[in-house]
Image: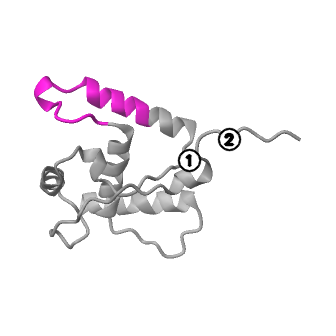
């Protein structure tokens, strides 16, 4: 029996950790502000993407990937030259969504599945809008 060809780096690539950038003092509330990100990149003296510590692979449905790609194209297309400071990628969109979700007060008790989690996120988002 012939050996199977290995494509990519296998399951280990899911858990790649890049070389961490030295941490700076700052906000201890758990939320990171836009100015803090800019300052962190400036202090690190390297491109923004190199300031992230963890590389994570995720599984998406085709409609989710299509939405991400579409939003990425719309954002890049619909901005003036003075607002092209950095490239907005699918990763940028996902990180922004995670930062937004991090600010929500989500009821995490007895979440049975992904549909229930989505419902709780929608409830938390609605409650924040009406507050």
The quadrant where residue 111 appears = bottom right
Identify the element where label 2 is drawn: loop
| Label 2 close to label 1 by CB (< 8 Å) | no
Q: Is residue 27 above or below residue 20?
A: below
Crowding around mark 1 (Cα neighbors within 10 Å: few <14, some 14 to 19, many 20+) is few
**Magenta region, mostly helix, strand or loop?**
helix
Q: Dot 2 corresponds to which residue?
A: 6
Residue 89: image x %, image y %?
34, 37
Q: Residue furthest bottom?
A: 109
Whether residue 102 sits left or right of residue 58 in the image: it is: left
Residue 56, compared with residue 127, is above or below; it is above
Q: Would you place residue 5 above or below residue 15 in this image?
A: above
In the foreground, 82 or 40 = 40
Q: Residues within 10 Å of mark 2 (few under 14, many from 20)?
A: few
Disc 1, SS: loop
Q: In the rendering, which numbered label is found on residue 112?
A: none
- Residue 71 magenta-drawn? yes
N-terminal-most mark, 2 or 1: 2
What is the span of residues highlighted in magenta in the rendered image? 68-88
Display coloring: one colour
Quadrant assignment, res 60: top right
Q: Which residue is mark 1?
A: 59
Q: Please name the residue shown 17% across and 69% down the image.
A: 27
Nearest to the eye among marks 2 and 1: give it: 2
């Amino acid at each position: 029996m012939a050996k199977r060809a290995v494509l990519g780096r296998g399951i280990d690539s899911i858990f790649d950790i890049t070389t961490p950038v030295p941490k700076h003092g700052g906000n201890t509330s758990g939320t990171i502000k836009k100015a803090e990100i800019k300052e962190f990149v400036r202090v690190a003296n390297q491109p923004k993407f190199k300031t992230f510590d963890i590389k994570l692979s995720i599984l998406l449905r085709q409609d989710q990937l299509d939405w991400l790609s579409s939003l990425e194209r719309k954002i890049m297309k619909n901005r003036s030259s003075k607002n092209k400071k950095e490239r907005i990628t699918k990763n940028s969109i996902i990180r922004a969504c995670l930062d937004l979700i991090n600010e929500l007060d989500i009821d995490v008790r007895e979440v049975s599945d992904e549909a229930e989690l989505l419902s709780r996120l929608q409830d938390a988002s609605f409650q924040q809008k009406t507050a």
